[in-house]
């Protein structure tokens, strides 16, 4: 069996994209930390083990200040998110009552009748509107760069949805478990992550080391052909399966595992694949501007992971990550410096910044530095910056997303199409989810699962 990997760009790794500066500083333009928790987290760590990257891991434990201190910027002020029992028992701004009250009364709330609802509606119903408006709104902007009033609770937070379905309550679901999860035995690294209680991890040379190592591993195996700058223009059925048309040639395949974004796949599939084409077309995604900033000296007024903003505070700025706190190993080794990442746009990009093709890097940089000045009181200008505009980088699972995915899978099954859908458009947007979806597809194809 021969495996051919086609990559449309000149580099592998997609949104995992790292800049390594010659003075030793490391900057992430995409995801910056990976969570080790759950089956999907263990699966990724097992892969890191297999690639021999274990010695490169930079863990952040739950007792680390970056795990314990997360902030919200509300009413023009930074507020530390309550943690620990004392934080839950007291009324702390920006909240009007102790958070433990919302949690305690949640057990009594009746189960929802719908087979899906928006995250905002679900949390308002179970924990109150204030938590939905402030915490969950901010969280959805941080994770999905999306609007919790449109996103699906069932697809974005299946843990919450299942907890209510199986236990009638989020609290009970979290305490007692909310149903079966895939079985992935932990390898040495995953066992270490449990023993040392890691909250997240990165790699010494940045997260792009992961796809770089995978590429190296595949090339050395001699079993895989890898083509970069090989954008797929069209896919057509053939007697043996598919013909994949590239700009400069054709590849024949008896099975396609597609990690293309839904819209890109819909544009490539033949018209014989309606209504699949239409359903793929309907999965939208948002554009995010990621601005990396470096400042001389230690400039942060607080220590922690970073801060998020609810949409009521500022549509344009989603949040600021204090990279130097989580991963000081990525600072340049000589002299004190602070690295921050400002994330902007998402579901609000068009409203705030206009057409992504027309917005200038200067405008995005000015908006990012202004946010740092305003939120963190930093008066100096950054000594270094990098602006990355990620077009359509995060798929948005709107209410009813699960039905669309089910319907697409059914169509593929009924028509007996030799096609597997993987990647962030369907069943999870995190790095762990995407890696696991690839593994699952291969296991099904080889009849392992």
Image: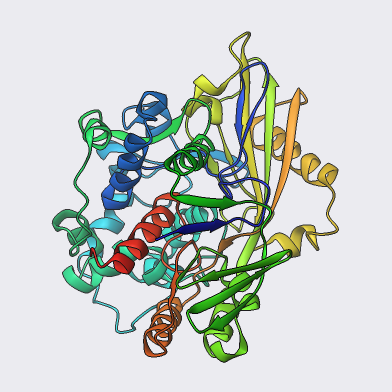
Q: In terms of depth relative to the viewer, which is nearer, 70 or 36?
A: 36
| Residue furthest top in the image | 334
Q: In terms of depth relative to the viewer, which is nearer, 315 or 46?
A: 46
Q: Is residue 40 left or right of residue 408?
A: left
Residue at point 45% right, 65% down? 422
The quadrant where residue 417 appears: bottom left
The quadrant where residue 437 appears: bottom left
Q: Indicate the colouring scheme.
A: rainbow
Which quadrant of the rendered structure holds the N terminus? bottom left
Q: Is residue 213 left or right of residue 246?
A: left
| Residue furthest left in the image | 176
The quadrant where residue 449 appears: bottom left
**Number of numbered labels in the structure image:** 0
Q: Position of residue 5 (x, y in %)?
A: 53, 56
Q: In this view, does 296 lie to the left or right of 400?
A: right
Q: Can residue 30 be seen in this view?
A: yes
Q: In terms of depth relative to the viewer, which is nearer, 128 or 190?
A: 190
Q: Can residue 160 be seen in this view?
A: no
Give the answer, above or below, for where 134 lies relative to 307. below
Residue at point 76% right, 22% down? 383
Q: Is residue 368 left or right of residue 395?
A: right
Q: Position of residue 83 (x, y in %)?
A: 33, 39
Residue at point 74% right, 64% down? 350
Q: Position of residue 62 (x, y in %)?
A: 32, 32
Q: Where is residue 125 in the image (x, y as percent from the top left)?
A: 36, 71
């Amino acid at each position: 069996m021969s495996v051919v990997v086609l990559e449309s760009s000149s580099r592998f790794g997609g949104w995992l994209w790292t800049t390594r500066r010659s003075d030793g500083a490391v900057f992430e333009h995409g995801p910056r930390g990976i969570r080790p928790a759950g089956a999907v987290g263990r699966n990724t760590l097992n892969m890191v083990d297999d690639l021999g990257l274990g010695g490169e891991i930079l863990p952040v434990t739950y007792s680390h200040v970056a795990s314990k201190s997360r902030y919200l910027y509300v009413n023009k002020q930074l507020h530390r998110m309550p943690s620990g029992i004392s934080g839950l028992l007291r009324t702390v701004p920006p909240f009007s009552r102790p958070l433990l009250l919302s949690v305690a009364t949640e057990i009594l709330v009746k189960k929802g009748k719908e087979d899906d609802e928006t995250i905002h509606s679900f949390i308002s119903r179970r924990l109150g509107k204030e938590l939905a408006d402030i915490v969950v709104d901010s969280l959805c902007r941080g994770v999905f760069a999306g609007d919790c009033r449109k996103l699906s609770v069932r697809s974005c937070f299946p843990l919450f949805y299942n907890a209510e379905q199986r236990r009638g309550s989020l609290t009970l679901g979290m305490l007692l478990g909310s149903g079966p999860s895939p079985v992935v035995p932990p390898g040495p690294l995953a066992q270490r992550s449990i023993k040392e209680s890691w909250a997240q991890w990165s790699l010494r040379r940045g997260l792009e080391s992961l796809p770089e190592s995978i590429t190296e591993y595949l090339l050395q195996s001699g079993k895989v052909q890898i083509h970069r700058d090989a954008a797929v223009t069209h896919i057509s059925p053939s007697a043996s399966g598919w013909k994949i048309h590239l700009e400069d040639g054709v590849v024949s395949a008896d099975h396609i595992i597609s990690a293309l974004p839904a819209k890109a796949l819909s544009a490539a599939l033949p018209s014989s694949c309606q209504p699949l084409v239409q359903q793929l077309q309907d999965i939208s995604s948002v554009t995010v501007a990621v601005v990396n900033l470096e400042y001389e000296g230690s400039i942060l007024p607080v220590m922690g992971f970073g801060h998020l903003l609810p949409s009521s505070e500022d549509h344009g700025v989603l949040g600021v990550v204090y990279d130097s706190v989580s991963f000081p190993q990525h600072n340049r080794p000589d002299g004190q410096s602070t690295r921050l990442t400002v994330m902007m746009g998402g579901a609000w990009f068009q409203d705030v910044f206009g057409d992504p093709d027309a917005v200038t890097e200067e405008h995005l940089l000015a908006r990012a530095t202004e946010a740092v000045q305003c939120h963190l009181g930093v008066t100096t200008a950054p000594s270094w910056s990098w602006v990355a505009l990620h077009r359509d980088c995060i798929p948005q699972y709107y209410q009813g997303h699960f039905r669309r995915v089910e319907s697409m899978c059914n169509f593929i099954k009924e028509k007996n199409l030799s096609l597997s859908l993987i990647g962030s458009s369907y069943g999870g947007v995190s790095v762990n989810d995407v890696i696991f979806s690839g593994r699952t597809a291969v296991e099904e194809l080889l009849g392992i699962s």
